[in-house]
Image (cartoon, rainbow, N blue to C red):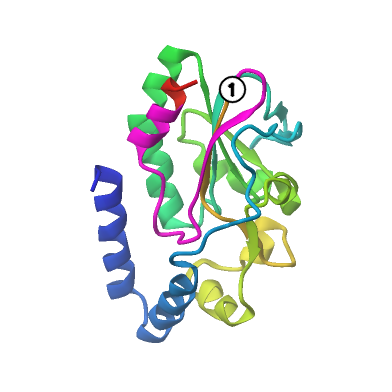
Amino acid sequence: MGDLDTDLAELRGSVASHVPAEIAEVLKADREKFVGTVVEAAAKPGTAMPDLTLPDANGAKVQVAEGSAVVVFYRGAWCPYCNLALRAYQREVLPELENLGVKLIAISPQLPDESLSTKDLEFTVLSDVGNELGRALGITFRLAPETKPAFDTLIGDVEKINGEPEWELPYPTVLVVDRDGVIRYIDVHPDYTTRTDPADVLAAVKAL
């Protein structure tokens, strides 16, 4: 396992041991439903990245499909697995991308004013409000209602944080988009406690 995989495994153990047992059971059952899932609806390599503009944390509009980019979809700044992965990509992927002239963009449905909690990140963070882009890419799902009390207890009201009454979230996903706005690589993780290894991201970029 790579360093990120090791850190994610340690976080899984930490979460399981630090949250109340009844909540840990709900989270475990919810996660296990997604293990081994293949997201058939997800966009395929060779298709165009939807040409959408999304707001950054300050409300400025950014065109996602403009120029070569690594695009990372995450659930929200409230997700500890997302924070761990984003910081690993900043540490292990961003320097090489900068050398290659490739952008790193992170996207979640979290509202722009709530995305400021990711302000220590050194790359672009955008808000896919209403999951428009995620849905167009076929990488969103709706959380089961029975998981809502557990999430509310742990992190507060995701509905309010994400501005999303339907409890729709993106699967953690990494895409590599070429300078023509064509998707060349996509890796979708229905099990939100796993993520794309930084080495795999860099290999996909270097294959452009």
Q: Quadrant of residue 203?
A: top left
Quick check: 9 left or right of 96? Answer: left
Which x, y percent locates residue 144?
Answer: 61, 76
Residue 198 covered by magenta stretch: yes
Of residues 207 and 5, the one drawn nearer to the viewer in this rendering:
207
Task: Please state the extent of the stretch shown in magenta in the rendering.
Answer: 178-204
Residue 26 covered by magenta stretch: no
* Residue annotated with mark 1: 178
x 37%, y 36%: residue: 200
Which x, y percent locates residue 140?
Answer: 65, 57
Which x, y percent locates residue 104?
Answer: 51, 28
What type is the residue that disc 1 sits on?
Answer: Asp
Q: Name above or below for residue 82 compared with residue 36.
A: above
Q: Name above or below for residue 53 compared with residue 132.
A: above
Q: Name above or below for residue 14 compared with residue 69.
A: below
x 72%, y 61%: residue: 164
Of residues 127 and 58, the one drawn nearer to the viewer in this rendering:
127
Of residues 85 and 46, the one drawn nearer to the viewer in this rendering:
46
x 53%, y 49%: residue: 74
Quick check: 86 left or right of 103? Answer: left
x 40%, y 59%: residue: 193
Which x, y percent locates residue 187?
Answer: 49, 45
